[in-house]
Amino acid sequence: MDVVMLSRIQFGLAAGVHFIFPSLTLGLTLLVFLFEYKFYKTNDELFKTISSFFIKILGLVFALGVATGIVLEFSFGTNWAEYSRMVGDIFGAPLAAEGIFAFFLESVFLGVLLFARNKVSKKVYLLSAFLVFFGSHLSGLWIIIANSWMQTPAGFAIEGGRAVLTNFWAAALNPSTLVRFIHVIIAGWISGSLFAAGVAAWYLVKQQHTQMAQKILKTAIIVFCIMSLVQFASGHLHAVQVTNLQPEKMATFEALWQTQTGAPMSIIGIPIESEKKTYFEIKIPKLLSLLAYFDPNAQVKGRDAFPEDELPPVLLPYFSYHVMIGLGSLFALLSIIALLLLLRKKLFEAKWFLYVLMFAIPLPILANEFGWIAAEVGRQPWAVYKVLKTVDAVSTVVPATHVLLSLIIFSLIYLLLVVLFITILIKIIKNGPQAQTY
Amino acid sequence: MDINIFQNIWFLIIGFLLTVYSILDGFDLGIASLMPVLTKNEKEQKQVMDSIWPVWDGNEVWLITGGAALFAAFPFAYATVFSGFYLALMLVLFALIFRAVSMEFWYYDEKRKKLWAWAFTIGSLLPSLLFGVALGNIIYGIPIDLNMNFTGSFFTLLRPFPLFIGLLGLSAILLQGCTWAAYKIEGDVAKRAKAMINKIILASVFFFILAIVLTIGLLPSIVSNLFGWIGALFYAIALSYVYVCNRDNKPFNAFIGSSVSFVSLWIMAGAALYPNLVRATIEAYNLTIFNASSTALTLKIMFIIALIGMPIVIAYTVYVYRVFKGKVS
C-alpha cells in the first residue's frame, strides 16, 4: 500500500476510535449537569449519588478522550505536513482556540467534579458541572468548525500556493458549520442518554438500585426521546445542505448515477461503482427531489454530472449513510415506544423494553461512526473540498514503512484501549452507583 | 501593526505556553517517572497518583494548546518538525496514550496493577526525555532542504548535543517531580523525595555545564546572546535556592525554586533559537518566525483569542490549584 492510503487508514483509525469518547462526553456532561441541578434544587441525596456515578464514568471516558485526542492534533503535522503547510493559516486557529476557550475549562473543572465534592460549596460544584458541560460543547464547536471548513471552505484566498485567511467569521461560520454542529451535538446527547437509560434498564432488570435506576431512566429517556425526534429535522437540514453544496457527495450517498428530474430516494441496495448500477435496489420515487428541493420534480445532479477524478468511492459512503439513517429511524421508533410506556406509567415494568434499551447502548455510537465515515469518505478525493486533494496533503518525507509500523502499533494499542474501556465500564456499572471512588 | 510584531508576539506566547506546560506537567511527568524509586507499595503509589490526579489532564492541555498554537501561528515549522521527527513523535504519542489511561487502568484493573504502574512510569519518562532531545535538535540544527523538508533519519536526532539537552531537560522534569513529591505528599514518600533532590541537582549541574561547554564549542554564533547568560545565571541561582530550601525543610519554596529554574532554561532555549524556530544545517534554510509564520490576519485574530482567553484560563487554574492545596496523606 502507498503512503497516502496508509496515512488515511491511520488517521481514520485514530479519529474513529477517538470519536467514541467525545460523543459520549457530550451526552454525559449534559446528564451530570441535569442531575447536579436537581440535587441542588431538591437536596435529594439520590441525585447526588447518581451524579457522582456518572462523573466517575465521565472521568474514564475523558481520560480515553484525551489519550486518543492528542494523537489527532499531532497527526496533521506528522502525516499531513503538506496539508498543514497549505491550509495551516486557517486550520490551526480553531484548534488553538479550542484549547484556549474550551479544553482548559473542561479539564480543569472535571478535576473539581472528580475530586472536590467536599472541598467547594454546592454552588461552586454546580457551576463546575455547568462549566464542564459548556466546555465540552464549546470544544465540539471549534472542532466542528475545523472539520466543516474542510467540507465547505470559505473566508480564504489562494496566495502563493497556500490558502490564506481573508475573513475569520466566514471561515468559522462556513456554510456547513452550524448544521453539522447541531447534528453532532444531538448525536452526542442521544449516545449519552441512551447509555444512561441502558444502564438504568440493566439495574431495573436485575432489581438493583431500583429507586435510583428509575430516576436515571426517567431523565435519560426524556432527553433521548426528544433528541431522537429532533435529530430527524437536523439530519434533513444537513442533507439539504450537502445536496446544495457538495452535490457529488449526495449523489454518492444515494447512488444516483444519472442526473434526473424527480429523483428517487434509495432505501436499500448494492451499488456497483464499476457498472454504475445499483442491484436489488428499493427506492421511493421522487422523494429525493422532494426532500432536497421541496419539489417532487426538481432536478438532482447524479454522479455523471462530475469529472471522474473528482468523485468519491460509492460503496462505503452509500452503506454508511444508509446504516446511519436506519439506526436513526430505529431510535425514533424506540423513543415513540418509550413515550407511550412512559405516559401509561409502564416504562419501569416493561421488561422486554428494558432489555431492548440495554442492548441498544452501542447503537448510537455506531450511528455516529457511520455518519462520520459517510461525511469524510464522501468528501474524497479532496482533503479540503475543491482546494486540496488528499494525495497532495500527505507528508512527503515520511516513508510508507514508517507509517505501516506506526499503524500496526496504533491498531494494537487502540484494540487494547477499547477492550479495557469496555471491561472497566462494565465493572464500574456492576459495582453500582454507591461504590467508593478513587 | 506590522506583521513582524505579531510574529515576535507569537514566538513569546508559544514560549510562554511551553514554559507553563513544563512547570505544570513537569511535576506530574517527573513524579510518575520517579514512582518506582519513591514508593515501596501500592498505598504509596496511590499517594503519588492522588497528588496529581485532579490536575494532570488540565496540565497536559498546555501542551495541546502549545502544539495547536504552533500549528496556527507557524504552520511551516509545525509541518517540518512533526513530519521530520515522525518515529520519535510516534514514540511520544504511544507513551502519552499509556500515561493518560494508566491511572484509571491501575485503579480499576486490579489483576494488572504492576503492569499499569510501569506504563505510568515509562509513559512519563520517555516523553520527558524526548521533549528535550527534540528541542536540542532544533537548536543544534537539523538537515532541511529547500522545500523545508527534513532530510535526515531517526538517528540524526540522536546526535550527542541533542541527547545531552534531552538529559538536561529530563533532570529538570525529575527535579520538578521530586520537589513536588517532597512538598505535596506526607510520610515516607516525602522523605525519600527529600533525600533524592540533591542527587538530581547534581545531575542537573553536570548536564548544564556540559550543555554550556558544548554550546560554546559547537554553536559559537549564539554565545554572545546576553539573554542566554542571564538565563544561565538565574538557573544557577534557582538551583542553589532549591538546595537551600530542601536543606531547611521548606519544600514549597524548593518546588518554586525548581519551577524558576525551568523558566531560566526556557529563556536560554529561546535566546539560543531566536529568531529561528528550527535551525537548519544549511543556514539559508533556517525556519524563522518570519518565513514560517501564518499571515498577519491569522496572527492578529489568534492574538485577540489569546488575549481574551488566557487570562481567564490562568485565573481559574490558580483558583482550582488553591482548592486542591494541602498535602496528600
Image (spheres, coloured by chain):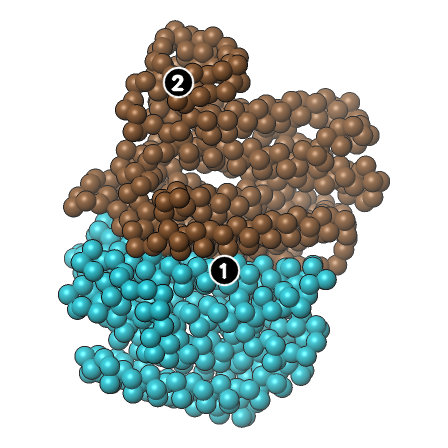
Chain colours: A brown, B cyan
Q: Which residue is mark 1?
A: B94
Residue at point 71%, 73% (across, down): B43
Label 2 secondary element: loop
Q: Residue at x 75, y 28 (%)?
A: A353
| Left or right relative to B129: residue B142 | left
Residue A145 drawn above or below residue A53: above
Q: Position of residue A84 (x, y in %)?
A: 30, 50
Instruction: Give x and y (percent) for residue A435.
Output: 76, 55
Q: Position of residue A174 (x, y in %)?
A: 34, 35
Q: Which amino acid does the dot numbered 2 rest on?
A: Lys
Can you name the residue that lies furthest to the right here?
A: A207
Residue type, numbered disc 1 = Phe
A242 and A25: which one is in front? A242
Residue A145 lies in what quarter of the image? top left
Query: Could you classify mark 1 by the number of other residues whose Cα lies within 10 Å: few (under 14), some (14-19), or many (20 or more)?
Result: many
x 35%, y 69%: residue = B155
Label 2 sits on residue: A276
